[in-house]
Image: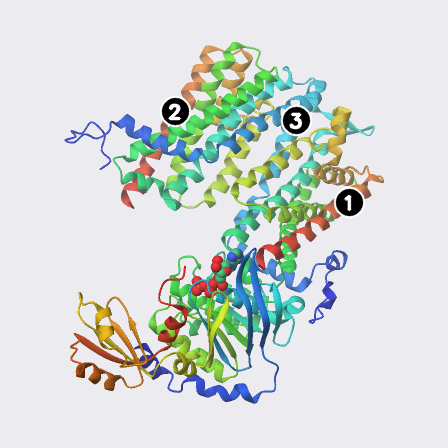
Amino acid sequence: MSATLHPDRESATLLARIVPLRGTSARRASLMVERSLMVYRRGWVIIVSGFFEPLFYLLSIGVGIGALVGSVTVDGTVLEYTAFVAPALLASSAMNGAVYDSTFNIFFKLKYAKTYDAILSTPMSPGDVAAGEICWALLRGLIYSTAFLVVMLALGLVGSPWAVLVLPAAVLIGFGFAAVGVAATTYMRGWQDFEFVQLIVLPMFLFATTFYPLSTYPSALQAVVVCTPLYHAVELIRDLTTGLVDGTLTIHVAYLAVMGLIGLRVAAGRLEKLLLT
Amino acid sequence: MSTAESGRQLSVPLASVEAVATDSADPPLVHARGLTKRFGEFTAVDGIDVDVARGEAFGFLGPNGAGKSSTMRMIGCVSPPTEGTLRILGRDPRTEGPAIRARLGVVPQQDTLDTELSVRENLLIYGRYFGMSRAAVRDKTDELLEFVQLSDRAKDKVEPLSGGMKRRLTIARSLINDPEMLLLDEPTTGLDPQARHSLWDRLFRLKQRGVTLVLTTHYMDEAEQLCDRLVVMDKGRFAAEGSPRELIATYSTREVLELRFGADADNKVYADKLEGLVDRIEVLPDRLLLYTDDGDGSAAAVYDRGLRPVSTLVRRSTLEDVFLRLTGRTLVD
Amino acid sequence: MAQAPAVVQPRKVPSAWSRTCASLGFWAFQYRRTWRGTVVSSILTPVLFLAAMGIGLGTLVDEGGRLGDEYLLFLAPGLLAATAMQTATFESMYPVMGAIKWVRTYHAMLATPLGVGNILGGHLLWVAFRVTTTAAIYLVVIALFGAAPSLLALLALPAATLCGMAFAAPIFAFAAGYDSPAGFAALERFVIVPMFLFSGTFFPVSQLPEALQWVAYATPLWHGVDLCRGLVQGTQELADALMHVGYLSLWVGGGVVAANYFFRRRLEATG
Ligand SMILES: Nc1ncnc2c1ncn2[C@@H]1O[C@H](COP(=O)(O)OP(=O)(O)OP(=O)(O)O)[C@@H](O)[C@H]1O
Ligand SMILES: [Mg+2]
């Protein structure tokens, strides 16, 4: 069933055209963002402070490990170690933010606060709720990514005009992980299941070429690393900030987009099942 | 009885506003045939047929677990029916849920307030979900906060409000979009008498304006006051259907005579002695209920038979008598 | 009610020690429900970190040749101390605030012969137990990675526990004194994470700008890291060790005094 069947004849989002989500409208989804803005008007300090964590990591690597390592060679190009790690930190913090927003926060609202039960007795549909919550996660992530990119520029860690595409790329990364995060959350039974989230996110953070190039791994491991979504996220941002752009960029983009669309589809369907019983 | 008290507020019984319903040539706002809801193997609603006309006040009565809330959730388009036909406002909930819900107001049995927001913000954002403009929502919010007497708590978080205050906020929330049909699942549970009467008053006025009311309640006086027509549900089916007066006429008598013979009297023995005096006698542990059209006459007849009850009370028959007759006195679950 | 046990007791009340053990027992009992998950992450976390940073990143650092040590040997004991800090922090924030505010476990305990001192002591002992077991697993993993060349490494276990408690005790005080969980987010972001990143775990503090070096030396984590590193590598000088132990003990002692103060204020005043 497609969104255009909707009697209100509201404009379906582009997303809704690609992934047929029943009765999703951009205007209604944006109301979820409006709600979040209301909630965080009082809690903006929490949002602002979220920026410092990746910044501390960047500084620590700059003065510490960067000084120990010196430089790394990627595809024959020699890079400052900090310039190598910084884009990876940006990508991982986009992932972390999206995962956190779409798992802990959504689980709380779904299971404990019953926030969505009330919302669904209005014209809002499960698709609106899923899309709106993901949008909010993306907006929040966009603020962090922008701030981080500014710091990278200030520290001279951006080496290419391609970097103008970093922000849309970071949004794409957020979308991929947030959508999968919401979908996964709908399967969670209790807080103990969040242990699994940690068990997936931490190894990805450590191994997805965040701290050293793919060539450092034995080839069997390389094949595994290449399959992880964070690898594509890291490589995408790194290609853009270093200017080492080639055809693989499209693979990274496609991987993340497909992951997000599948996640969104599953999330909307599962939310409908869970909430409209 | 509290019916007498409420009569003060609602001088016209709602039932007399029935004319509104019959005038309109609209399709019924709720139209269900063979409506069924199953949760796994369990059948919560078992093939019911209902029609609710515009402007009507329709009530669901029934013991806990009868399937009232399950039915209300289907009518509110948040729970897809397992089987049967359902049309709400003439539309199909399966495909036009958002468009239907836009015209409904819902008070769910459990408050589902947004605990991350303040009292006022709860109403503001809820109005926005209906696509109202910010200015329109603001005006409506102030008016509704005034109505449920929460204006002075507007800035507070929802969590620390008392149970009755939360209920009032939920009721205010359901009115934000000026709904054509209000679905109220036990709206007054937890309210103090003042709040209850002020809500009844408000509902009465909404009904006069043509708003259709569908409600469930465990308060028989409420059902009698508010409903033009009601059904008594039991185990997912309708046990009886009609106006409060019809139901009382069919399933009870005009009056009830309550007799007490003291704490250790054997009521069964007294019941045998009163055999044939009235239509029906019910033996309770502490008293006898005699269903009769003339309470005082029957009381005199009791004395004539030489019985001397410790106390006698003649009262009007109520829906409660109908309810208990239809669904039994023992706790169902 | 919560008097020191020295007060003459007309009736037989359980001894102070057994009352503290009762409080400890409560937390152990609670743990039965969640221990599986924590064991899995206690094993996986060190394996992942040592593999990714110690070996993977270590390859790059060792190629750079700017650090005297082999990076894995340098990093592993640092992570041991940092993990003790993180475990202690985690076990001391929400559980303590919850026991005061939400679940009100402490209040339930106060209705028994347990006093505030027993409650605090028992809970701190429980955190010490959690820190010690987590650190022990970490130490085993370090040994399996071949990064514990000296037998002195065994002493790194109590050192890690001491380091953890230098965080647990002050955080107990913080959790009892500060009434909102928003403080925890700030504590994590502005105290714990920066310490983790800058207190000598990942690189020598000497690489920091001069002024920041002194800040790093003042943190309990640096003392924990330096102590653990010396012991695991077998190069620890006695005088330095005593200095580290003394400094960390000061944090533990100060933390206990402060926690005792805030616990009494919260539990006895507001009942
Ligand atoms: N989501 C659900 N999953 C499984 N069973 C359900 C669900 N919702 C309701 N039920 C069952 O359906 C039956 C009817 O429930 P319902 O809430 O409709 O009763 P009710 O008439 O509203 O009762 P009450 O007066 O207690 O509110 C009950 O036995 C209930 O356990
Ligand atoms: Mg119900």
Label 1 in the same subunit as label 2 = no
Which quarter of the rendered picture does the C terminus of chain A lie within? Answer: bottom right
Residue tagged 2: C250
Instruction: Please give the name of the residue rendered at 72% of the width and 33% of the height, measured from the top-left corner.
Output: A83
Taking C193 as reference, is A3 above or below it?
Answer: below
Q: Earlier in the sequence, mark 2 or mark 3?
A: 3
Residue A71 is situated, as x and y percent measured from the top left of the image, at 74, 26
Residue sitting farthest toward the right: A247
Which quarter of the rendered picture does the N terminus of chain A lie within? Answer: bottom right
Instruction: Please give the name of the residue rendered at 39% of the width and 61% of the height, measured from the top-left corner.
Output: B161
- Mark 2 vs mark 3, foreground winner is 3
> Distance of mark 1 from mark 2, alpha carbons?
53 Å
Amino acid type, label 1: Val
Label 3 in the same subunit as label 1 = no
* Tags 2 and 3 touching, CB below 8 Å: no
Taking C146 as reference, is B11 above or below it?
Answer: below
Taking C73 as reference, is B155 above or below it?
Answer: below
Quick one: SS at disc 3? helix
Residue tagged 3: C52
- Mark 1 vs mark 2, foreground winner is 1
Taking B226 as reference, is C72 above or below it?
Answer: above
> Distance of mark 2 from mark 3, alpha carbons?
35 Å
Residue tagged 1: A253
Amino acid type, label 3: Ala
Tell which of B255 and A132 is nearer to you: B255
Residue C50 horizontal side relative to residue A165, left or right:
left
Quick one: SS at disc 1? helix
* Tags 1 and 2 touching, CB below 8 Å: no
Quick one: SS at disc 2? helix
Instruction: Please give the name of the residue rendered at 40% of the width and 33% of the height, measured from the top-left corner.
Output: C29
